[in-house]
Amino acid sequence: MTVQIERIAIPTAHGTPLGVTKYSSPKHKERTIVVSSATGVLQQYYSKFAQYFASQGFIVYTFDYSGIGESLVSTKSLTTFEGDLKSWGSIDQATVIDYAKYEYEHHTITLIAHSIGGQLLGFNTNYRLIDKAVLVACQSGYWKEFRGIHRYKMWLFWYFLIPGLTPLFGYFPAKKLGLFENLPKRMVYEWASWGRKEAYMMHFENKTDYFFDAFKIPILSLSFHEDPFAPQNTVDWLARVYTNSKVTRVHHDKTPQERSAKHFGFFKSAYKEVFWERTHQWMLNNTYQ
């Protein structure tokens, strides 16, 4: 099936547009997917995944968070961007959900979140428009939840790299460290404040910005063997935060049939039969086998 790819700019409450990509096929089936990416990962990374689901009859939207990729005005704007980390959920993610519903009012919407995308889901002001969610390696970032050398890496990240380098550049220079895209100053400071707390983002919970317990939808939460960024226990933690949702929690151990996807492999085309087709079935009938 031919997949059409369209670039869109959607206005936001930030005052700057979001760069969005829409994937569609002529014979769509009243189902929409919105992909919410990992921290600093460009939406292009999810293109093959989006094209596959578009070929299966879904309308698929990917997007870059404000200050990232096609939603970045300039490097200088990273120093003055007023949005915090929560706003990537309450404004960015919510804006794309709203746009998707506006374009296809009668479609069901599944949010597929990678890593921080599943954390941002709890701040999404348009949560009522979401029918299902798939959380791929979505976790707590509290440093003591990690083990071995990764615990010390997380401690260094939250306590030294972010607070040490961000004032020097006016933003977090992740590209210079070979990590991911550069991050806005205010956003990364809030992220670090979460990572130092045992309850992570929930340490700062309030009834105005937090909607985690308002979700009453089916959620599929996946984790993967030897994922250094989202160990099984950290993914368990986030799954429990969605207290009123029906969560299907699956951890993939390394087997000959399921090569370890770690943190980023799920979205690679090599895993189409292993993960994509099973996720497709779950979205249709809530079974993941």
Image (cartoon, rainbow, N blue to C red):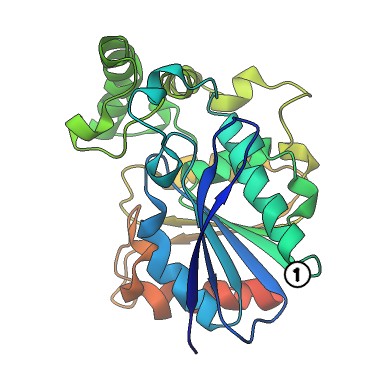
In the depicted structure, whether residue 127 falls above or below residue 110? above
Residue at x 56%, y 67% (from the top left corner)? 60
**Could you tell me if residue 216 is visible in this image?**
no
Observer-nearest residue: 132 or 260?
132
Q: Residue at x 77, y 54 (%)?
A: 129
| Residue, disc 1 | 107
Query: Is there any visible trace of residue 76 in the rendered image?
Result: yes
* Residue 37 x/y as whole percent: 46, 49
Work out whether 104 lies above or below 54.
above
Horizontal and vertical percent for residue 273? 41, 81
Quarter of the picture holding the C terminus: bottom right
Amino acid of disc 1: His
For label 1, the SS is loop
Residue at image position (47%, 40%) is: 234
Q: Residues within 10 Å of mark 1 (few under 14, many from 20)?
A: some
User: Residue 90 in the image: x percent, y percent?
Assistant: 66, 35
Q: Relative to residue 201, is residue 47 drawn left or right?
A: left
